[in-house]
Image (spheres, rainbow, N blue to C red):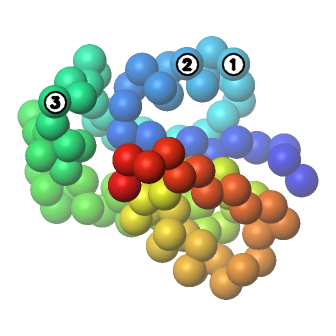
Amino acid sequence: KGECLFVVTEEQEALDEIKSRFPKCRFVDKERYANFKFDKWLAYQHLPHTTPKENNFLYLLDILALARCDCLIGGLNGCVLMALNLNGNRYSHVDVLNTGVN
């Protein structure tokens, strides 16, 4: 169908870029990493205004929303893999990008 774009990203700059190109995109409103430093893995970065429990809850919201989509394009990560599992192979299109990072 492709009528709506749901975005999951941990980086604010990436979300800002996608929103500038797709103003009607949807996303979970949460704290994201700004000016991300690539000298640390995302898992070890600290979001100062969010507790680990809140982070986990919002991560689950992202997974559940992705699992309800019609198509899935994403990087090889836990969120995408879990959404694939929960969706039960009902996506009309799937493209998992493996850039060799994970």
Amino acid at the residue labelled 2 = Glu
Amino acid at the residue labelled 1 = Arg
Q: Which residue is mark 1?
A: 21
In the foreground, 37 or 7 = 37
- Asked which secondary structure carries label 2, the reply is helix
In the foreground, 75 or 21 = 75
When the figure is inspected, residue 8 is found, relative to residue 39, above or below; the finding is below
- Numbered tag placed on residue 39 in the rendering: 3
Q: Which residue is mark 2?
A: 17
Horizontally, is 102 left or right of 8 in the view?
Answer: left
**How busy is the neighbourhood of tag 3: few (under 14 within 10 Å), some, or many (20 plus)?**
few
Residue beneath the point at 19% across and 50% down = 43
Q: Mark 1 or mark 3: which is in front?
A: 3
Q: Where is residue 16 shown, x and y percent of the image?
A: 50, 20
Residue beneath the point at 22% across and 55% down = 54
In the foreground, 77 or 23 = 77
When the figure is inspected, residue 25 is found, relative to residue 50, above or below; the finding is above
Q: Where is residue 35 shown, x and y percent of the image?
A: 26, 18
Horizontally, is 82 left or right of 85 in the view?
Answer: left
Mark 1 and mark 3 lie on one chain; the one further toward the N terminus is 1
Q: Could you tell me if the residues under marks 1 and 2 are in contact, i.e. CB atoms within 8 Å?
A: yes
